[in-house]
Amino acid sequence: MRDPAENGQLALLLEVAGTPKPGNVDRERDYGDLRFEHFLAGAVGARTGLRAAADGASIGTAFESSIEGMSGQSGGNTQFGALLVTVPLVRAAADGRLTPDGVTETVEATTVEDACAFYEAFEHVGVAVDDPPEGLDSLDVRRGAAATDALRERGATLYDVMALSADRDGVAAEWCSGFERSFEAAGWLLDDEGPIHRRASRAFLRLLAAEPDTFVITRNGETAAEEATRRARAVLDGEADADALAEEFVARDINPGTTADITAGALFVALERGLEV
Amino acid sequence: MRDPAENGQLALLLEVAGTPKPGNVDRERDYGDLRFEHFLAGAVGARTGLRAAADGASIGTAFESSIEGMSGQSGGNTQFGALLVTVPLVRAAADGRLTPDGVTETVEATTVEDACAFYEAFEHVGVAVDDPPEGLDSLDVRRGAAATDALRERGATLYDVMALSADRDGVAAEWCSGFERSFEAAGWLLDDEGPIHRRASRAFLRLLAAEPDTFVITRNGETAAEEATRRARAVLDGEADADALAEEFVARDINPGTTADITAGALFVALERGLEV
């Protein structure tokens, strides 16, 4: 009944509603200047780009459109990473190939123009990112549209750009691994029971317990990221309380945002595979 | 930046996120089988109908489309009344006349075909309604599409249908009063400060304190509706706690849903008039 564009938007909404998701905005927690309502408005604004992805626009154009719409609220970056996971999945679903191989074909088919549109998306909103790899300053995403000449000179497609940072960005790693973690967590969501805001919380914790969050590495350092993973595991082992951890991480500004992005991708795949809302 | 269809969808989302709204699903409260996630999915599904309203489809067709989309979740009726308030406001905004007079022109221009589409919307979802007025059994909305012959014989427009129940249905009363309460509460939202989920809560309480909720009258009786109004006033007077009242009303299944519907309309008007998210 819902088409992939609609399920993409719903995945964004179900992701932010999932609670507790330690360190992230969720149904019960806001950061001071980044609140639940900003994520609602971000999801509303992203719909046009998700619709474009489902209707056959290029991945880069659809993504840039989704970010332009998402950024029409005052909270800043709400769903940049979540959309970078979700937009190719929406396209793959619309093409009837929502599998690891199918979405790999989708992202491998991206072009230099897709890469240019991706860089232009950074003009709409501030995103916390690492420095580019050694010797690739000309491809720093923070250059925005100013980097497009360098992209064209190198003939770098959007897939190439993602491959450059797959070792230190969890979303880029999804692009280069058949969206492995999104599909795995979709299975957890489907096998789980009860309200979806609790399933999303559990999937988030399992993802975080399995791998350090690259957004935490970027913003807080490796030690904090390892701590977040260790403490998520303690929650899953019944040795710590998820709500208490959520309060603590928000207070310390330890925000496992990449894990939330992959949770959004997982929710999308689960919705397409029959997760009933 | 957001157009009226997008603001319509965002109004639905901000309404359900508003907390506490005693007796309603909100960011912090679910009913057992009617949960926050159902409202998220309802808002996602309603977007196509809201888009149709903004793009010039007839009010009845746009409304019926929004309800068809809204009903694509397992919680049942989430936003029937909210959409019945919001769809004409979206149209009026798209036509550049989002004023009490402008939206009155919009609803007075509805036709018999709009009325037929409205009745067809009841085929998509169960809605708790009163018996029709004496002698008008043939126009009972619960007849759904079976009532269309009677509508055509009487030449009853959708506005005429609303006028028949304006004295006992708060949404119909909005149609017949220039959406007076929606516009008034939009002013409260704009004059208020702080996060929108708290502004929505306060606007809801002021609406409930001012007039008994007709959905509570239908489902729980006049005494319960008068109690709800009295106790909302006590919260506003600082004599009672809103969260405690919210817990109690959910436990007693006293659901001032019409007041929530009008809150959604107020949020839409406020968004169109510059409420920043």
Image (cartoon, coloured by chain):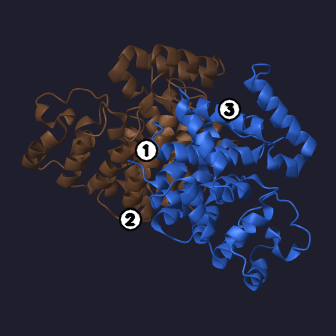
Chain colours: A blue, B brown
Marks 3/1: CA–CA distance: 33 Å
Tell me the amino acid under the disc marked 3: Glu
Q: Residue at x 35, y 21 (%)?
A: B219
Sequence-first disc among 1 and 2? 2
Can you say whether B219 is above or below A183 in the image? above
Q: Nearer the viewer, residue B189 or A119?
A: A119
Can you say whether A194 is above or below B117 in the image? above
Marks 1/2: CA–CA distance: 25 Å
User: Where is residue A123, by image quadrant?
Assistant: bottom right
Marks 2/3: CA–CA distance: 36 Å
Between marks 2 and 3 in the image, the one whose residue lies nearer the viewer:
3
User: Where is residue B198, by image quadrant?
Assistant: top right
Q: Nearer the viewer, residue A67 or A230?
A: A230
**Circles 3 and 1 on the same chain:** no
Host chain of mark 1: B
Q: Nearer the viewer, residue B51 or A268?
A: A268
B192 sits to left or right of B211:
right
Residue receiving disc 1: B180
Between marks 3 and 1 in the image, the one whose residue lies nearer the viewer:
3
Whole-percent x, y for residue B6 in the image: 51, 56
Q: Are marks 3 and 1 in contact (CB under 8 Å)?
A: no
Q: Secondary structure at mark 3?
A: loop
Q: Residue at x 18, y 33 (%)?
A: B140
Q: Residue at x 37, y 35 (%)?
A: B170
**Residue B184 in view here:** no
Whole-percent x, y for residue A201 in the image: 66, 33
Q: Nearer the viewer, residue A267 or B48?
A: A267
Residue receiving disc 3: A28
Residue receiving disc 2: B55
